[in-house]
């Protein structure tokens, strides 16, 4: 997987979106990390609030998603 990153955030987080995302829509999220938190937002509407999770919770979610992907 390749990633595209943007830093357009007042808190200077570096947001990462998968290269599988396209500019034609779709359902995509972006993530950014700091020392203690993973920030998750909708890449189609970056003005909305981001969700946050601990690194352990995010890792568990990604592992679950990979294991159950079709």
Image (cartoon, rainbow, N blue to C red):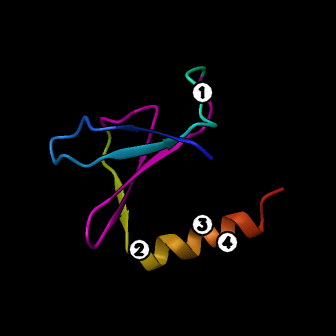
Q: Which mark is residue 62?
A: 3
Q: Which residue, given by chain and number where applicable, does mark 2 sit on?
A: 55
The x and y percentages for residue 15 are 36, 45
Q: Tag 2: Cα neighbours inside 10 Å, few (<14), some, or many (≥20)? A: some
Crowd around label 3: few <14 · some 14–19 · many ≥20 (10 Å): few
Q: Which residue is mark 4?
A: 64
Tags 4 and 3 touching, CB below 8 Å: yes
Residue bounds of the magenta highlight: 25-47
Residue 54: image location, x then y, percent: 38, 74
Name the foreground residue: 48 vs 20. 20
Marks 2/3: CA distance? 11 Å
For this orientation, the residue located farthest to the top is 24
Mark 1 and mark 2: span between their CA atoms?
26 Å
Secondary structure of residue under mark 3: helix
The image quarter in which residue 2 lies? top right
Q: Residue at x 46, y 31 (%)?
A: 44
């Amino acid at each position: 997987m390749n990633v595209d990153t943007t830093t357009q955030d007042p808190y200077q987080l570096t947001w990462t979106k998968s290269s599988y995302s396209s500019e034609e829509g779709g359902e995509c999220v972006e993530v950014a990390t700091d020392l203690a938190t993973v920030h998750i937002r909708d890449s189609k509407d970056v003005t909305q609030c981001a969700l946050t999770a601990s690194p352990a919770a995010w890792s568990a979610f990604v592992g679950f998603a990979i294991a159950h992907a079709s």
